[in-house]
Image (cartoon, grey):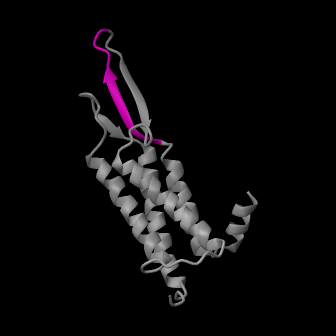
Amino acid sequence: MRRLAHAWRAMEPERRLAAIAALALLVTMFFPWYGLQSLNRKTGAIYSRNISAFGDVSFVEAAIFLVAAGVMAMLLARAEGREFHLPGGDGTIVMVAGGWAALLIFYRVFSRPAGGGYPVGIEWGFFLAFVAAGSLAFAGWRMQGSERPEPPL
């Protein structure tokens, strides 16, 4: 816990925004993303249940999880003073990661989980995840403006 507190204090405001957005993206994966309704033909009762991103894991959800975890790991390593080179810099990587996550979430609008013949709707957690991915891309854009050039190899 001390390590995280020290890393948080060492971060610039733009990196803090990226860390919050990446954490929000991870947290929204536990919220309901899909709503599934089914009909009991014998009683005529309609059953509905919510499915989180982890309830129907595919390449998309796994990639979103890896994007958020990777950005958080990169930000923690930078806050601890570790030196490594990324193509385009940290801001570009975070911006592309947020855009990629947003694109994957948008793709899931058209490629929803199978409902067994019943409709599958989009729930509120899905929209929060889309906003978190957009915030991650925005944070990367802000990081680009405040980056200092990397030292030569």
User: Residue at coordinates 49% horizontally, 58% vertically from top-left?
Assistant: 68
**Image-based side of 10 in relation to 119, left or right:** right
The residue that appears at 34% across and 49% down in the rendered structure is 59
Which of the 4 quarters of the picture holds residue 41? top left
Could you tell me how many numbered marks the image carries?
0
Residue 148 in percent (x, y) is at 55, 87
Q: Is 34 within the magenta?
A: yes
- The residue lying furthest to the right in this view is 2
Taken as a whole, is the magenta stretch helix, strand or loop?
A: strand
Residue 87 versus residue 57 in the image, above or below: below
Residue farthest top in this picture: 42
Is residue 16 visible to the viewer in this orientation of the structure? Answer: no
Compared to 39, does 118 lie above or below? Answer: below
Q: Quadrant of the N terminus?
A: bottom right
Asked if residue 121 lies in the magenta stretch, the reply is no
Of residues 62 and 43, the one nearer the viewer is 62
Is 33 located above or below residue 10 in the figure? above
Q: Is residue 110 left or right of residue 5?
A: left
Name which residue lies at 43% across and 33% down: 50
In the depicted view, which residue is nearer to us: 18 or 124? 18
Q: Is residue 143 visible?
A: yes
**Residue nearest the viewer, comparing 146 with 74:** 74
Outermost residue toward the left in this view? 117
Q: Nearer the viewer, residue 98 or 39?
A: 98
Percent from the top left, x then y, of residue 66?
45, 56
The spot of residue 37 in percent (x, y) is: 34, 28
Q: Looking at the picture, how far across and down is residue 151, in whole percent?
A: 54, 89
Q: Which residues are magenta?
A: 32-42
**Residue 12 placement, left or right of 109:** right
**Residue 122 falls in which quadrant of the image?**
top left
